[in-house]
Amino acid sequence: MIGLAAASARVGRAGAAPPPDELTHVELVWIEKQIEHWIRFGCEVREQVLDRRRRILFFRPGSVFALVRWAANEHGTVLSRLDILRAVPCSAPCQTVHTVTPGGDILLRVDGWPKVEHVLQLIDAIEAIGIHPAEVAPDHWRHVHNRLAAGETPRAYTMQRHRAFLLARRIGV
């Protein structure tokens, strides 16, 4: 698992960020073996450390990030969830997600450790071909969500698909 220390190793810290009220806030908690929230990928523009167990990351509207939430009690795991979200402007309609303010555009959501682990492996495969997962076509994450929900295998994200997405975005399609 990627912990709090991995945040400084992630790509994407930008210079001048918009005012905090224009950004999406994601509150992360890390209480070893009890509650563990972390960002698997994403390009935050700011970080606010609240205490040694809690911090808030700030994302620009339109940026894509993966939020992993895990919790356990004395009987075992009670929550395993991975959400891939696109940050939205504060006034835009959005879905509510626990620990994300104001919410986000949910591109993918999976529950249960086997599905979470599968999506983490898909993310690793995308990174292995040299693509930052935050730059992947949002429709690909929706495709993965829908295929997993139907019990099917999602298509792999390839460099060719990525180039097509970048070209389409460039011409405004």
Image (cartoon, rainbow, N blue to C red):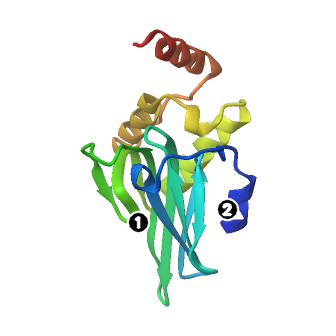
As rendered, which of 160 and 166 lies closer to the eye? 166
Crowding at label 1, few (<14), some or many (≥20) Cα neighbours within 10 Å?
Answer: some
> x and y percent of residue 22 in the render?
40, 49
Q: Is residue 12 above or below residue 82?
A: above
**Mark 2 = which residue?**
2
As rendered, which of 103 and 161 lies closer to the eye? 103
Quick one: quadrant of the N terminus? bottom right
Quick one: quadrant of the C terminus? top left
Crowding at label 2, few (<14), some or many (≥20) Cα neighbours within 10 Å?
Answer: few
Seen in the image, is 72 located left or right of residue 131? Answer: left
Residue type at numbered disc 2 = Ile
Q: Picture quarter containing residue 131?
A: top right
Residue drawn where x is 41% and y is 29% of the image: 139
- Report whether residue 31 is seen: no
- Report whether residue 62 is seen: yes
CA gap between label 2 and label 1 equals 18 Å
Q: Picture quarter containing residue 164?
A: top right
Give the mark nearer the N terminus: 2 vs 1: 2
Residue drawn where x is 47% and y is 9% of the image: 171
> x and y percent of residue 158 in the render?
61, 23
